[in-house]
Amino acid sequence: MTTMTGRPALALAGAALLLGTLTACGGSAGTPAAGDPPTKIQFTAGFAPNATTTNIVAGVDQGFFAKQGLDVGLITPANAADATKLLTGGSVQFAVINSFNQIIAKSQGVGLVSVAATVQNANHGIMSRADAPITDPKQLEGKTVGMTGFVGNKVMLKDILRRHGADPDKVKLVDVNLNGPALLAQKKVDALGDAIDYNVPTSYNQAIHKPLDDKSSYTFLPFHDLGMFPYELANIAVSQDYAQAHPDLVRRFLTAWQQATQWSIDHPEEAVAGTVKRYPNLNQATVLAQWRVLAPQIQSPDTAAHGLGWQTPSKWSSIDELFTTAGVTKHSADLNALVNNTFLPAKP
């Protein structure tokens, strides 16, 4: 197995940058015969490598993709919204796209298929500083709240505000992309309205020079404690055409992904060290702290029963209904065509 080769940067669809090729080759039973060239696969997580790509890097470093005859490249788009364009345009074969965006795209007729859930129960929440805590959503009236910019997240926050007697029109929502922790630390926003618990608190503590696991520096109100239904956050998607033309490649990719993910859960320090070695701009302590929070969210009673990556259609139905009611989508998405667990390996 060879390591990342540092090939020249490559523009994809005018937006993507090939950060490096995670190269693996080889084969085993049920994969291409020895000597056959590996199948090249492009993958995007929707953003630059971080804790969420720990298992993908491990999949290459530990040979899980190699055993499936796959040569995997990791692509970073200019912004998360480009992941869908790269996937449907054929520039990547696999992409992590949040379930909100997949439902919106599917309702618009985009040919996506969600084949695995990378996070079983998303933990978005309202995050504020400890010295100016938000302990009830109604306190956000008259405040400036930073949002990542995803339409679905805004819909969910507004729904929570209404549930708690707050007027969404009295809350100023501003798009901060992924700069929320820094802006909260600088007191340029009063709260973050769609913070994700695995990475935003650690990034905020880093910005204010606190221990990464210090929970006394902020207040976090999880959406699920505020009445929001459970939902899957980020799912691996392929285009409908690719799934129909290459079902075996989808199964082989997910087999390797499953194995790499379980290995990363079992060996967090080693897995994170491999990611930081490939991407030295990352801070190992930060990535490890984030992975330790994220890893339990990859697992659930459903994955214990069916295996990592299992998707629960009822969770998607709740999102679809909320979006239709809120007018985000004109009609319901065809969830039977969108959510597909059949490519996942059968649990032993």
Image (cartoon, helix red, strand yellow):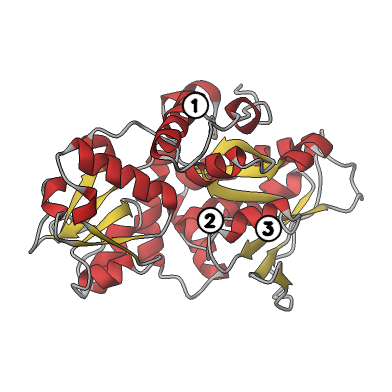
Answer few, some or many: residues within 10 Å of disc 2's Cα (few below 14, many 20 plus, some between 14 and 19).
Answer: some
- Which amino acid type corresponds to the residue marked 1 in the rendered image? Thr
Q: Is residue 337 left or right of residue 211?
A: right
Between residue 152 and residue 73, name the one nearer to us.
152
What is the CA distance from the residue labelled 1 to the residue labelled 2? 23 Å
Vertical position of residue 168 compared to residue 307: above or below: below
Q: Is residue 132 left or right of residue 43?
A: left
For label 1, the residue is 312
Residue at image coords 24%, 32%:
227
Q: Earlier in the sequence, mark 1 or mark 2?
A: 2
Between residue 200 and residue 70, name the one nearer to us.
200
Answer few, some or many: residues within 10 Å of disc 3's Cα (few below 14, many 20 plus, some between 14 and 19).
Answer: many
Number of callouts = 3
Q: Are marks 1 and 2 in contact (CB under 8 Å)?
A: no
Residue at image coords 57%, 33%:
333
- Which amino acid type corresponds to the residue marked 3 in the rendered image? Leu
Of circles 3 and 1, the one toward us is 3
Answer few, some or many: residues within 10 Å of disc 1's Cα (few below 14, many 20 plus, some between 14 and 19).
Answer: some
For label 2, the residue is 53
Vertical position of residue 256 compared to residue 211: above or below: above
Between residue 237 and residue 151, name the one nearer to us.
151
Of circles 2 and 3, the one toward us is 3
Residue at image coords 37%, 55%:
290
Does the image show residue 43? no
- Per the image, label 3 sits on a secondary structure element best described as helix
For label 3, the residue is 86
Does the image show residue 195? yes
The image quadrant of residue 141 is: bottom left
Of circles 1 and 2, the one toward us is 1
